[in-house]
Image: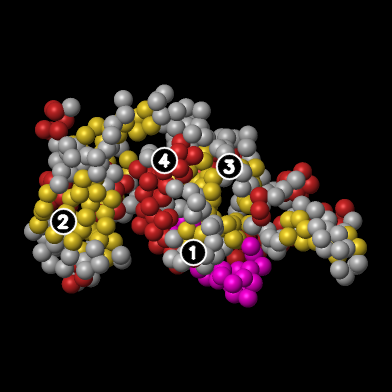
Amino acid sequence: MKIKYVVAVFLIFILLAIGCTPPLRAYTEYSVEFAGHNHAAGKAIQRDDEWYIPTRLLMQAFGNQTIKTDNGEMLRIYTADEKGMQRVEKPIYYRDEVVVLMYHHITSKPRRSWVITPEQFEVQIQEVLRAGFEFITIDQYIDYMLHNKPVPPNAVLLTFDDGYASFYTDVFPILKMYGIKATNFVIINTIGNDKSDSVKKLTWEQMREMKKAGMSFYSHTYDSHKYVPINKEGTKERPMLIRPMYREDLKRVETRSEYLARVKQDLLMAEQKLKQELGNTNSVIAFPYGAYDKDVLDICNQLGINISFTVKPGINNREQRNGFRINGGDQKIEVAELIERMAHRGEERADDKRDVVWRNSISRERVVFKQSPILQNDQVFIPMNEVMELLNIQPSINHQGRTITLSLSSDDKRSR
């Protein structure tokens, strides 16, 4: 039976403007667990004997969405249902398979259909989480593909192509807020080279900083992200990686051996540079334009590049080493359509098998906190005891394990 959610609005009016709250001094951080899961959207912090939790965690744990107004004096938390704490069903769309999402450039002023705004990207992230998908890392994907390790149901890998600087300026802050790790496939020869494109590209320094935070960077070739002529007249062009090209310096088309040597050298140089600059120990590639052939796959195998990606839509199992990807970075794709595409790639459908989870709902009301919320590093922290009372949730603090466990109150348990 499907549960139809009614969007309710929980308004939190703050006595003191968040912008006037002094910055945090030294504080203690504890992880937060709910329903047996450790939530990565932020940690609880302690200040002046009072515990605070990030509003981002509410969305991940309970299905709430938090928005801070420009003047910093009001928070709106959108919730799932007006009835309060309610048991809802989380569909299992697929098991032991992985959906891979693909993006390119993110900017506030998109000029092309394959570019979306940071706001659109964040809404997608929120809806993907709300729909019951779980993001995994590239390391988990590699272990799944090569070492027979498990992945959670509804597993999703987040990838970006081309190494645009917007991954650092616009995407990285969003990923940090939601505790999500992503992989960017970079064109090595364009790194830090602003003249290579009208849009700025990442630098090695930016990548090293993000790598420390769990992001990863792999090959989009060294310098083969191009269409090149394959005849003397220049009337025919093909992706550089998959065909012998016309060599102006030789006044002829490459021989097969020259073509294979060129491709192998390009892919090898990319791997060497990534290992040198970032210390990569694994080798993964996303083919430019999704273009590949048997020769390219053979060369990848020779170089130890055992995992690759195309741009073809689909879902990946362990037999699909040359992975499918679903395009999320397209202005023409609505969020609901993207979720639908992801959900219908698995063999098990939402109406076949379901897991039971708990999602919080708060009825429409006006609340004034006794303790002023705190703004720290672009995150809003609200007083834990007060919000837990509103949610009918009982916090339990384990100082030895540095963990706060949230559980249903006894009244809520008896009502189930």
How many residues crowd mark 2 within 10 Å: few (<14), some (14–19), many (20+)?
A: some
Residue found 25% across the figure and 61% down from its top: 68
Residue, disc 2: 12
Q: Quadrant of the C terminus?
A: top left
Mark 1 or 4, closer to the camera: 1
Q: Which residues are magenta?
A: 187-215
Tag 3–tag 1 contact (CB < 8 Å): no
- Residue 390 x, y percent position in the rendering: 13, 46
Mark 3 or 1, closer to the camera: 1
Residue, disc 1: 110
Residue, disc 4: 133
Residue 330 has which mark? none
How many residues crowd mark 4 within 10 Å: few (<14), some (14–19), many (20+)?
A: many
Q: Quadrant of the N terminus?
A: top left
Residue found 41% across the figure and 23% down from its top: 352
Quarter of the view holding residue 248 = bottom right
